[in-house]
Amino acid sequence: MNINMKESVVVAVREAPYRNTGMQGINDIERSVLEFSRECPKAVIVDGTVYSFDHSFDSKVSQEQLYRTLIHPLVLKALAGYDCTAMAYGQTGTGKSYSMGMSAERMSEEHVGIVPRCLKDILKYMNINDQKENHAAMGEVFASFIEVYNEKAYDLLAVDVNEPLTSRTHPRFTGGTCMPMKSQKDLLQILMLGTKNRHVRATNMNNNSSRSHAIVTIHIQQGFQHSRLNIIDLAGSESVRRTGNEGVARAEGVFINMGLMGINKVMASLSAGRSLIPYPSLNSQCSLTLLVCISPHASDLNETLSTIRFAKNAKQMKITPQLSQQ
Ligand code: ADP
Ligand code: MG
């Protein structure tokens, strides 16, 4: 397997489809602030300024192309025993959940997002299927689904979803209930339960689920080796933003809100090459792929520029992938 270990933080942008508000006449459709050029396929031009990333996808990219180019390499790393994280960041409505594929609804193949595509490939590579006897299987696969809201993590597959996960009540906190996965049907079931519980929690707690982060983790168990692929649908960037904080501080807000630890510590430990972060798999030894979803609308330009700045900062993080241990 040819795995690129040098590029441990990969950053990509994806343009959201143009929202047709029905407000404009045919002749005065709002001008898009985003441009993509054939000459610079890794760049996006935002309001005339060129920003380069590892990948740049315009609104015409398919779910399959996005998965093949950006995420499939992470799946290969996870199968090789490395902890990996794919994370979507951006303003509400720009296609984070659509891209990550956390929806429990059945949809046509072209719209299927990242989570089911990852599971499909992982089960295929590991020879796992839903036949009763899996003699040829090369290990086991599990999935968990948690929500992070207001610096606390909640197990969306637990009986009591309103009880936050803490290391005190859950001394072996490994990111929530793990359900065995043998087929897409198993995944659909946990996505349905998790989504329902997310709504119940949002209603009970009087909060808005676009302010919370959703994390699906696919656990790959091969002999003594246990690696995790985290797929994170972050809260809308506009709700994560903290007044007066820009640049690196802006990136900090996300991590603080994720309840992991202040990004000061995260950034410091990452740049010092230490692994202090107590959340499983989001540490300096984990490969990170960040998908930033941006709006083409002029009215969203400020949020888009903030998102681009966040993406530029994320690229500065230093991560050294290491083989995961049980
Ligand atoms: P977010 O999670 O960032 O708030 P969503 O993923 O919910 O945004 O996307 C908003 C709406 O736009 C949804 O109805 C979604 O299905 C649709 N959508 C987003 N991106 C695409 C795309 N590339 N192609 C088709 N529909 C999309
Ligand atoms: Mg969403």
Image: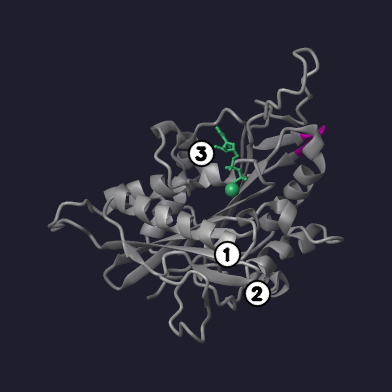
Task: Name the mark on residue 278.
Answer: none
* Relative side of 241 to 291, left or right: right
Q: Assign a secondary structure to mark 3.
A: helix
| Magenta residue check for 16 | no
Task: Estimate the x, y position of residue 217 in percent, counting from the top left.
Answer: 44, 61
Query: Going from the N terminus, do you reach mark 2 or mark 3 first?
Result: 3
Q: Give the prevailing secondary structure in the magenta stretch.
A: strand
Query: Going from the N terminus, do you reach mark 2 or mark 1 first?
Result: 1
Dot 2 beta carbon under 8 Å from ligand 2:
no
Looking at the image, which residue sits at the far top? 27
Count of number-bearing discs: 3
Q: Assign a secondary structure to mark 2.
A: loop
Badge 1 amino acid: Asn
Q: Residue at x 78, y 39 (%)?
A: 300
Ligand 1 positioned in quadrant? top right
Look at the image and tell me in which quarter the C terminus lies. Answer: bottom left
Cα–Cα gap, marks 2 and 3: 30 Å
The residue range painted magenta reads 46-50
To which residue does mark 3 refer?
A: 66
Task: Judge the density around disc 2: few (<14), some (14-19), many (≥20) Cα neighbours within 10 Å.
Answer: some
Badge 3 amino acid: Leu
Labels 2 & 1 near each other (Cβ < 8 A): no
To which residue does mark 2 refer?
A: 261
Q: Residue at x 83, y 61 (%)?
A: 245
Q: Residue at x 60, y 72 (%)?
A: 152
Badge 2 amino acid: Met
| Front one among 201 and 244 | 201
